[in-house]
Image (cartoon, grey):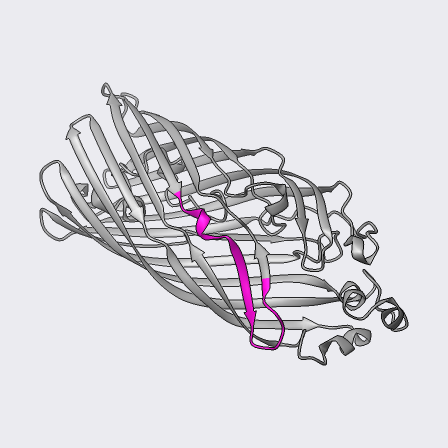
Amino acid sequence: MGAGFAIMEQSVLELGRAFSGASTNTGDGSMVYFNPGAMTQVRSKLLTTAGYLIVPSAKFNDEGSQLNPLVGGFPLRGNEGGNTANLIPIPNVYYIQPLTSKVSFGLGVNSPFGMENQYHSNWKGRYQAITSELITININPSLAVKLTEKVSLGAGLNIQYLQAKLSNAVDFGAICLQAIGLGACGSRGLLPQSADGMVALKGDSVGFGFNLGLYFEPSQTTRLGISYRSRVEHEVKGTANYAVPDQALILTRGGQFIDTHTQTRVIMPDQVMLGFSQYLGARWNLTGDALWTNWSLNRELRTDFASPQGDSIQQLNWNDTWRLALGLSYTPEVQKWTIRTGFAFDQTPVPNADFRPARIPDNDRYWLTAGFSYRVLSNLTLHGAYAHLFIPDPAINSKSATGDRLSGQYTAQVNIVGLQLDWRF
């Protein structure tokens, strides 16, 4: 996927060249998402349907994880969590229809943000994360207008549904020791790592945003594009459900650690993309782009409980990021085929190991991609692509709500395959 919890997979054609031509692409329906201004280049109705299979791998290697020194500082018990990443299918669909010679309509349904992982329930970092799932579904109607023969402008509305599910263990022994003291807690069997409970958070939201795109074709061989996607703010309303061991029920008397309603503010960041496409003769095409993402909007993840329990705060301190990509396409003399390749550097928003969450153990990514297009019929084109993401081993030194520290390093990589069909009618 993309850095943070962004999903770049919105076009198999573009996946083949590492999305380096996304802002100037006129070859498939993904321009609804990447640059709606380019929709005026479509001469007939166009339907694009695509599916991707993301095959990630992420394994934690412990390097001295331990409890809060205030409750003994002993090593955290448990295993290393296994391969946390799940196999993830992602679909999207786009439709474009010219309304007049200068106005075009487009509609996209996709998932621009998301993530999913799952650890063993008894791993060392269970107090920070066990299951994590974030899903978005984005509906994006758009319009484009050709201002001149060389310049087009597009705009779209984004209606975005978000669903989140999170769970982690709760160390009621450590909580009791810090709140009451060793004598009262020890007699009840409430000692660190010996009285674990569980909390599961679930919620959803609908948010709204917009996107703009400018497409410029200064010559028959050169294309330029710039686009903007606005932030989408979500007020995620849901529930917190606790499983509390019998000996820890004393800790719920003040109204804490009970099932209750929750509210969490989550911001899907705004993005700016600009790029070029340059034909080098009749058969070669060089593409490049830069994508800026406003991840610094996410300084913390704060959950407010309707019960007397205090807010749960996950400090993120994320930074803004850049993604830079170059691609090359070649169309042989038999023009039914096009082959392409690309490379991209995708910067992580995570500032350092202290703020790398176990739910998103993200790091910089280096994309190496290859793809093809094959014209099955005069109006039917098949695209296929493969990408491998090289990820330097992310270090983690993250502190939980009870002060224990997860210390170690992940080994991670991602493989992505995609197939897409374009139908012009």
Instruction: Where is residue 80? Give x, y as percent.
Output: 74, 47
The question of residue 304 being in magenta is answered with: yes
Instruction: Where is residue 390? Give x, y as percent.
Output: 55, 32
Q: Residue at x 59, y 33 (%)?
A: 392
Instruction: Where is residue 116? Give x, y as percent.
Output: 56, 53
Q: Nearer the viewer, residue 182 or 417?
A: 182
Q: Which residues are magenta?
A: 293-312
The question of residue 320 being in magenta is answered with: no
Quarter-wise, where is residue 126 in the image? bottom right
Quarter-wise, where is residue 223 in the image? top left
Task: Reply above or below: 391 against 131.
Answer: above
* 241 relative position to 4: left or right: right
Task: Reply above or below: 253 against 380.
Answer: below
Q: Nearer the viewer, residue 297 or 58?
A: 297
Q: Residue at x 78, y 43 (%)?
A: 64
Residue 16 seen from this side: no
Instruction: Where is residue 255? Give x, y as percent.
Output: 66, 79
Q: Nearer the viewer, residue 135 or 254?
A: 254
Residue 272 seen from this side: yes
Residue reaching furthest top?
281
Task: Reply above or below: 73 against 171.
Answer: above
* 236 relative position to 381: left or right: right
* 78 relative position to 51: left or right: right
